Amino acid sequence: MKHLLRYSLMCVLSILWGTAFAQTEVKFDFDNGDAALFGLPGVSCNADEANGIAESHDGDFTQDATATKDGVSITVSAAEEGAKNANRIWNKSAVLRMYSGSLTIEAPGHKITKLVINYSKDKWQADSKPDVGAFISSTNQTTIWSGSSSKVVIKIAGNSQMKDITVTLDGESGGQGSGDTNYGTAEAPLTVAEALTIATALDADVSTSEDVFTKGVVTEITTAWSSQYKNVSFNISNDGGTINLAVFRCKAETEDYVLVGDEVIIKGKLKNYKGNTPEYDAGCEIVSLVPGDGHDTTPHTDVKFDFDNGDAALFGLPGVSCNADEANGIPESHDGDFTQDATATKDGVSITVSAAEEGAKNANRIWNKSAVLRMYSGWLTIEAPERTITKVVINYSKGKWQEDSKPDVGEFTSSTDQTTIWEGSSSKIVIKIAGNSQITDITVTLDGESGGQGSGDTNYGTAEAPLTVAEAIAAAIANGDTASKEDYYVKGKICSIKYEYSAQYGTATYNISEDGSEGTEFMVYSSYYFDNKSWQEGDTQIKVGDEVIVCGKIINYNGNTPEFASKQNYLISLNGKTSSGTSEDPEAALNHGTADAPLTVAEAIAAAEVVGTKASTGDFYVKGKICSIKYEYSAEYGTATYNISEDGSEGTEFTVYSSYYLDNKKWQEGDNQIAVGDEVIVCGKIINYNGNTPEFASKQNYLVALNKATGIQNVKISKANGAIYNLAGQQVEKATKGIYIQNGKKFIVK
């Protein structure tokens, strides 16, 4: 009965639409004279000496140009800045050739309902996008746009060689989208019947250009909630289910987000799927929901860690960290630094803060000012062993949270400049902190069930511990025929090659197996080279037998071919080599310098940029003159922070960060203090901190020479003359407070 009613409705609407509007076709045949409508001075061509033809650019579009015919205009823009080729009228078919920019079709007094673009074989880019409507079908010589608008702007994605364009108009006055059609609002939504009328009037597989608001009651869940894609499909009705509207892949954050009996208002694009199924298109959303009787009433528990109001003490640190404040008599303190993992526990929930990663500039710490919990690297772990965590709300100082911070399970679903929200289902969450994060409080929401790793059981592999081919096949089959949301790492040996890497496309397609033999295989489809870049001439080519690690999205293509998704994967390792033209250790080929032949400041800066944002594995020796001092040496910390340059002037500088004294020891009272102008040689690990500050890594470097003095053991003095020398090897008349050497022995004057 439902199908009969729907069919009857569609027939009536088809008759009404078919008789109400007379349609007109306007054809621009560029290959047969219409190219002249653009008013260019001529055509462009290559030189042909044999026929006496000179190279010409007369047909280049140096600015927008418009061809008009029967009330329809087509405008071709100039090519985008930096494009290799100009958009142009060429001397051979297809004469209209575009490589970038925009193609605009406009009919001010009508609505354009269809465009048919014919082109040279395969000379159209599928990535070219219209601003309204959609391309609904393509062959290797024709593409068809469908929609309803008085103006269509197509962004050209690459080499497109057009012979002709036919524009179909209806008889109405135009406008963007469907003109005066009522699409409803959140405050005054359409009924299901009204929405069905709009969707049924659309051409097959065409969506409305505007969002439509429809109110109805959920009558059936047609496709269960997807934990991977966070969506669900269902039907809505106004009469209990006699007339239904399908809602396809609607956004839903949790499994019980929408249930049968809920009253909802849907916002999204309507579509006439295949010409016989009016529905909301994928990506629609619920803007209002009144729960029915099916919702879970299980109580949820919130546990709040308010670090700014006392809960920071739960970590058990000896105090707080702060900068010195001489005016108020407050010394610098590191009592709140996390030198190792520390845990705060409250109401069955624990939060663990790790120490900062080795080489990090700042320690993770409890600070003396809001927000007191400050993390710069490492991991934030939230755990509720006997419960399931479903939501975590993290509040922080304005703008002080890094979007690149990633949880190992679930996902961050929303963020403002002071709050980020995690949602998922797991008893344990580990968040990798990506940089300066200043947290005021964390609220953990628990459900009433015993916990578990929730969605965290999925093994995606890592570069260090990739999946086997068998594991990758199983993961792809479980994932289904849509590309995975997460990247997977897979290791195997090449057993066959369909396409080697080429400079033309930059990708390769091949199969891998566990041992390089054919049989159980995983396809690596259109895979980029190292660093997710296109392969170039001179790069190493692949061959059968090579051992590879590949990273990217996986898919069970057509439900029967487990593979890496096309152009969504790249090479991580080729026979142990992990980047194009370099070994696994980027610093291996660098000059590290020596104490006798240290690097210059300029050489050190260049080396740090090669090493990158992780501290070097080897020590570098660098010589320079101190041009500015941030912190002198102090007995409390034993280190100093200062900048050096070639000649002691400020400008091109290298930072010596938290550097120990001579012999890699802490500075003590009586040791020589540094001063601007001092010549130093420093040894230690280098880093390009945050990608923009070349420096010695914090507390991983020390002073080798200060004004050519290289340590107590290297001070040259006479052992017999009774003269007194300071640690710089300079003879002094009288020993005051400090450390001195006399007759080859060290002594201290207090």
Image (cartoon, rainbow, N blue to C red):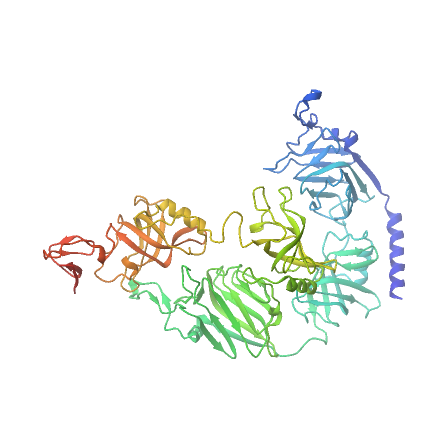
* Residue 203 drawn above or below residue 119: below
The reply, left or right, for residue 402 in relation to residue 505 is: left
Tell me residue 146's x, y (percent): 78, 47
Taking the image as drawn, is residue 560 in sight?
A: yes
Q: Nearer the viewer, residue 297 or 125?
A: 125
Tell me residue 15's x, y (percent): 89, 52
Q: Nearer the viewer, residue 271 or 382?
A: 382
User: Looking at the image, which residue is at 66% across and 32% down?
Assistant: 61
Tell me residue 573's x, y (percent): 56, 54
Taking the image as drawn, is residue 371 in sight?
A: no
Q: Quadrant of residue 672?
A: bottom left
Residue most extreme to the top: 52
Q: Nearer the viewer, residue 661 or 307?
A: 661
The reply, left or right, for residue 384 in relation to residue 251 is: left
User: Looking at the image, which residue is at 27% across and 61% down?
Assistant: 667
Considering the image in quadrants, where does the C terminus appear? bottom left
Tell me residue 281's x, y (percent): 74, 58
Q: Quadrant of residue 650?
A: top left
Query: Total marks drawn?
Result: 0
User: Looking at the image, which residue is at 29% across and 54% down?
Assistant: 704
Q: Nearer the viewer, residue 426 or 727?
A: 727
